[in-house]
Amino acid sequence: MVEWQAVYQVGLAVSTAVSGVAALIAWRNREENGGKPLVALLAAAGVWAGSSLLGTLRPGTRVAVVSEQLVLTSVLVLVPSLLVFAFEYTGRGEYVTRRALALLSVQPAVMGALIWTNERHGLVWSTVETTVVGVDDGGLNGVTVTVGPAFQIHTIYSYLLLASAVVLIVVFALRSRYLYQRQVAAVVVATLVPWAANVVSMLSDLPFDPTAIAFTVTGVVFTWAVVRERFLDITPVATEVVLDTIETAVLVADERGRVVDSNESACELLGVSQSDAVGSDVAALFTDRLGEQAYPAAATTGRSASTHEIQVGEEYYRMQVSPLVERRGEVVGRVFMLVDLTDQRQRELELRRRNEQLDRFVGVVSHDLRNPLQVASGRLELARRDGADEHFDAVERSHDRMERLIEDLLSIARQDEDLDLERVEVEAVAESAWTHVDTFDSSLEVSVDGLTVDADRDRLSQLFENLFRNAVEHGSTSSRPGADDAVQHGGDVAVSVEPLADERGFAVADDGPGFDDADLESVFDDGFTTTRDGTGFGLSIVTEIAAQHGWSVAAANGDGGGARIEVYTGEKTAKVN
């Protein structure tokens, strides 16, 4: 017994001193997250250990009884302090309100009053016996008590608070990020030490309770967590919330290239669950989803961050790879951040397209519209001088050209409007569009019976109108070699609308002179025309309407001569019934 008593007393003395020093350190850092409840916890642990030591030094006396009361009083402070620390540590500090603290103080205040007035009511200890000789009967402090109902309620309440604190910390540890596993593991172990000590005390025949010493260990580890590691300044929970809420995909890999952590955005991008991602080869994850270019060689070496641009089809990404360096300066892994730039690139392309469209408008207004205005102005001046009818005819043609230029500009501007898609019959739309064009003596043959497409009816009609107008004007007798220049139209073109051989679209053909081979690559360019009255926007508008629908166009010469414009709508958007 003497040997056990000496060992226990030394342990209590050391615990008292260590708790005091740790409490002073925690007090200096009390403004840190978790600092204030840690001060209370360490102070209570120090009082517990010191009071227990005092009881062993004066066994069987009134001093020993008072020390027993001090021990129980310190527990009233220590247990709630541990719970508050657990809330702040696990990132739930918003629950530690004044009202919550007031509620937590009710039980300690009531129980504290009962402890120090126990002689009047016996609710805490129904009997208290002291022995000076035969200390074995009362333990090392010579005090034997019979617990009352208040003590039993206090015990259940304290275990509930302790269990809540442990659950908070353990659950948090299971969800902890890779960077904080060492710190969190230490805190979890420190939280479980008092439980282990209490279990040993109840299940063994030790003549003393080591729980006071165990709580000192807990307090010291918590102090290390707050002061030394300072990871509560920016808590792991805050980091976890940021990683799980940002849209940027983030993966953490160790030096061997194994994924040790990933956020939800990364898992969605790579098409895997977090459980499947962790432990996988990071290079394989990226290459399976994004191709070989997604894992650059620079990602596996070097101590500096690197940035890489990745394109996968129409998707664009920027990958930033940063080394993960621990406090000792060693690279322990790498952080991969993948930013989806697809929307940004699309906006850039749209902005570029709009700028090009604006340049196109400026060019038309400054050049193409100015020319017919100058012609009309000059002809009017001549008409005032000699009154010849030919001048008025020229003015009329200039006005017609300006009107068509304005209509074409408006057509181009309307390409930004949303499509109203529906299933339409190509034959009906083509025949209707033919009636809206000055076709003169030209004829139309439609042989696409049953062909339907998903299209905006008005836009499709506009496409046909431009194709028909192009065929009539460029394929008429005035456009053929040897035609009389005085004949401006005299359209006698045979125009046909026919399905493509593979039934993936349709073609508009005529029996005119066709295209020069050198012009086949340029016929869809803005401003390209082979007639003096052409605006150069007809086929360009056809291209834009087709692109809006996801279609494509091509120019060719027919086998028997004449021009041919082919519109490819794709197998999913066109069929022959």
Image (cartoon, rainbow, N blue to C red):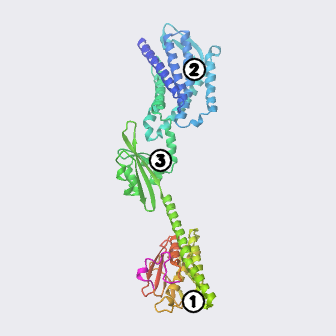
- The numbered mark, 2 or 1, whose residue comes first in the sequence reads 2
**Marks 2 and 1, how far apart in space?**
109 Å
**526 part of magenta stretch:** yes
Front position among marks 3 and 2: 3
Under circle 3, the secondary element is: loop
| Whole-percent x, y for residue 319 in the image | 42, 52
Q: Name the residue under label 2.
A: 73
Q: Which circle's residue, 3 or 1, is located before the other in the chain?
A: 3
Q: Residues within 10 Å of mark 1 (few under 14, many from 20)?
A: few
Q: Residue furthest top?
A: 133
Q: Main secondary structure of the magenta part?
A: loop
Q: Please state if 527 lies on the left or on the right of 149 as rendered.
A: left
Mark 3 to mark 1 CA distance (whole Å): 68 Å
Q: Does the magenta stretch include residue 184?
A: no
Q: Do the residues labelled 3 and 1 touch (CB within 8 Å)?
A: no
Task: Classify mark 2: helix, strand or loop.
Answer: helix
**Which numbered marker is on residue 440?**
1
Q: How crowded is mark 3: few (under 14 residues within 10 Å), some or many (20 or more)?
A: many
**Mark 1: which amino acid?**
Phe
**Residue 48 in sight here:** yes
- Mark 3 or 2, nearer chain start: 2
Residue 132 percent location from the top left of the image: 51, 7
**Residue ID at (52%, 47%):** 245
